[in-house]
Amino acid sequence: MFEQEVTLNRFLLKYLNGMMQDVDDADLAKRLADGGNSALWILGHLAIVADSTGRVFGLPPLQSKEWRRTFNPGTDGEVPDAGEVPDAGEFTKQQMLDAIHQGYKQLYPAAEAAEAEVMAEPHGIGLLNGSGLETRSDFVAHILTTHMAMHIGQLSYWRRQNGGAIIV
């Protein structure tokens, strides 16, 4: 059902990989002077959102509860030391990118095989009430495309504020 959205998500993931290629692990936790989120929080957030979206399809969670508490929507962007989050390792760029790819890769077969009738049901996500996204289909399409694109835009801004080049 979501073949086009999966194609766009794969494109966005390749773009994300290129954008993060020259970012050092030591810089991931830098927050912006204007209070913007760190690259680490954005990457962790993308990982847990992909993971959480799997619930729409009955998929098991891939990330720990601690990861979800740290990177969920509505968290303040302050990321604790990796030692405070079990199974976090060092919060490396590669670890974060692997978690993102793993989460979306798990979604693809379920999204492509989704039944239109089930996806037409309300999503039941309180955070999105009144957003204009009303169905499971709206939610999944958003996560695969516009949600990822919005956070890639934040990473682009973060890069520019930290002296990084524009990635095209």
Image (cartoon, rainbow, N blue to C red):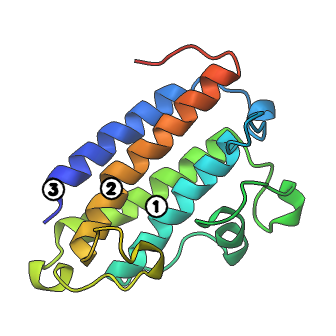
Kindly indicate the quadrant of the structure image that contains residue 110. bottom left
Reply above or below: 55 against 109.
below
Q: Residue at x 18, y 61 (%)?
A: 2
Q: Which residue is mark 2?
A: 144
Is the N terminus in the top left, top right, bottom left or bottom right quadrant?
bottom left
Q: Which residue is mark 3?
A: 3
| Mark closer to the chain start, 2 or 1 | 1
**How far apart are the two marked residues, 3 and 2, measured between alpha carbons?**
10 Å
Q: Which residue is mark 1?
A: 103
Label 2: element kind: helix
Residue 148: x and y, percent?
A: 42, 48
Residue 115: x and y, percent?
A: 13, 79
Q: Nearer the viewer, residue 66 or 142?
A: 142
Asked whether the viewer can see residue 20, the reply is no
Label 3: element kind: helix
Kindly indicate the quadrant of the structure image that contains residue 78. bottom right
